[in-house]
Image: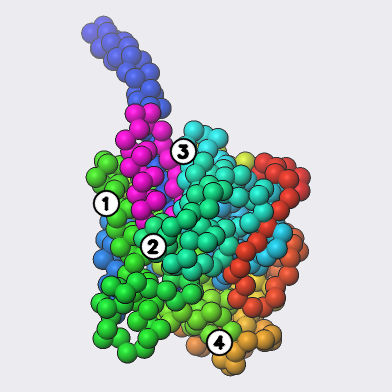
Amino acid sequence: MRRAIVQVLTLLLLLSVAPLATATAADAPRPNILFIVGDDMGYADVGFHHCKDIPTPNLDALAAVGVRFTNGYVSAPYCSPTRAGLMTGRYQERFGHEFNPSGNHGLPLSETTIADELKAAGYATGAVGKWHLGSQPAMHPQKRGFDEFFGFLGGAHSYFASAGILRGTTPVEHLDYTTDAFGREAVAFVERHGASKSKQPWFLYLAFNAVHTPMDATDDRLAKFSNIRNPQRRTYDAMMLAMDEAVGVVRKALADTGQEKNTLVVFISDNGGPTMPGTTINASRNTPLRGSKRTTLEGGIRVPFVVSWPGHVKPGTYDQPVIQLDLTATALAVAGIKADNTDSAKLDGVNLLPYLTGEQAGPPHDALYWRFGQQMAIRVGDFKLVRYDSNADTQTGKGRHPVTAAKLYNLAQDIGEANDLADKQPEKVEQLQAKWNAWNATLVKPLWGDDRVDNDGPEPGGPKKRRGQAK
C-alpha cells in the first residue's frame, strides 16, 4: 500500500514538473548567428594552419574556442557560386548559379535565402561587405531577406574609394578602408542589438573583400611587414592582418555585450587562394594543397573552416569532410527552423551539431560533389575523383585550357594530389564516376556562361518566389 502511494505521488510530481520543463525549453533564447567570410584566402595563410609570416591571433583564438574542420570545403572554386550555395544551403548548380554573374544575372529570385528564412522566424538580419549575388534592384540584399546592408554589390572593390559603397541603397560619401569600415559596421550591429530590450535574436552576414584584389593596404600595416621582400606578399600580409583585426573587434563586441555565449560564429573563405596565372593572383599560398582558385583541385575548394558556439560546441578538430552548405543547415536548425522537404527546395547541407556533440556517428555526407563547367570532382571517404583545369599543371596563363582526364587520389595519404591512382584502381574510378553522373543528372544547365576569366565585376535581375515554388 505504501509503495502504491509513493508511486502515485511520484507520478503527480512528474506531471507537475513536465509543463515547467517544456516551457523552459521553449523559452530558451535562440542563438544569434554570425557568418564571417574571407575572400580568396590561401589555405596556408592563417596561424591555425601553421602560417609563419602573418599574425592572425584573432582567427586563431576563434579556432581555439571552436571546432576547426580539417576537411572543410566550399561548393565552388569561385566567389559568387560559393556565396549562392551558402545563402541557400543548396548546391548552386541546382538553380543554374554555376559561374560568377555579370550584367542582369545573379542569385535567381526563385531561391529563398537563409536571411529570408531567419527574418520570417523573427530574427533581425544584417549584411555587411561584399554581396556579389546581383546588382539589379530586385537582387539587392534588402530584397533578399536582409533588414540592413552596408557594403558593395559587385565582386571586387577598391579598399579606399567610397564610390560604390552603399548603406542600404544610399551611396556612402566617405570611406577610410573597407576592411576597417566593415568591422566597425559589424560592431555597431552587434552593439545595437545587444543593447535592445527586445532580446530579438539576430543574423549577421559579414563578408570581407579581403584579401581579394586590388592589392590595397594601409601604410601602418605595411610597415609591420617591412621584412617581407616580395612587395605583393607584403601587401597581402597587411591585408590579412587588417581582416584579422576586424574579426577581433567584432568578437570583442560580442564579449563586451554579453552575447558571446549565445552566438554561433562560423568562419570560412569563399574559395582557395588564386595562385595560377590567369587568375587575379594576390600572393596567397595554399600549401600543402595543390591547385588554385578556379580549379576543382583541393587548392581551389578546401578552405579554412571554423565553427564556434561556447557551451554547445566543444573545442577541437573534426576530420570528416564537410561543406559550407552545412553551415546554412546548421544555422537554420539552431534557430528552430525546419527546412522545406519538397524536392525543389531540399537542403543539400546537413546540420553539423549532432556530429560535433557525438549524438550522431559517422560522416555527415556519403559524398561531396563539384561541377564547374567541364571541371568536376567527387569525394567519397578518402578518395577523390577529379577533372581539373590543366592550367594548374602548365601554368601558361590566360585563355582556355583543356580539362584533364579523370584522376583519382587518396587524400588521406596524398593531400597534395600528386599520386594519380586511376590506372591502378579503375573500378574505383568507375564507381565514383557513376555516382557523380547520377548527381549531375539532377542539376540544371548554367543560367549564364563561363567566360573563363576572373570576372568579379558587377552583376544582376528577375521576380521573387519562395523556396520550393516553380521557377
Q: Nearer the viewer, residue 182 or 65?
A: 182
The mark that comes first in sequence, 1 or 3, is: 3
Q: Secondary structure at mark 4?
A: loop
The answer to whether marks 1 and 4 mark residues whose Cβ atoms lie closer than 8 Å is: no
Q: Nearer the viewer, residue 225 or 283?
A: 225
The mark that comes first in sequence, 2 or 4, is: 2
Dividing the picture into quadrants, the one containing residue 206 is bottom left
Residue 252, label in figure: 1
- Inspect the image, locate mark 3, and give the three-letter code of the amino acid beneath it: Ala
Tell me residue 441's x, y (percent). Answer: 74, 63
Q: Secondary structure at mark 2?
A: loop
The mark that comes first in sequence, 2 or 1, is: 2
Q: Decide: few, some or many residues near mark 4? Use Cα within 10 Å; few <14, some 14-19, many ≥20.
A: some
Could you tell me which residue is drawn at 61 percent across and 57 percent down? 133
- Inspect the image, locate mark 2, and give the three-letter code of the amino acid beneath it: Asp
- Inspect the image, locate mark 4, and give the three-letter code of the amino acid beneath it: Pro
Residue matched to label 4:
277
For discs 3 and 2, the disc positioned in front in the rendered view: 2
Instruction: Describe residue 100's horizontal placement relative to residue 355 as left or right.
Output: right
Q: Secondary structure at mark 1?
A: helix
Q: CA distance from mark 2 to mark 4?
A: 31 Å
| Residue 81 seen in the current view | yes
- Inspect the image, locate mark 1, and give the three-letter code of the amino acid beneath it: Lys
Query: Which region shows up in magenta?
Result: 183-207
Instruction: Describe residue 97's horizontal placement relative to residue 218 as left or right.
Output: right
Residue matched to label 3:
124
Residue matched to label 2:
176
The answer to whether marks 4 and 3 mark residues whose Cβ atoms lie closer than 8 Å is: no
The answer to whether marks 2 and 1 mark residues whose Cβ atoms lie closer than 8 Å is: no
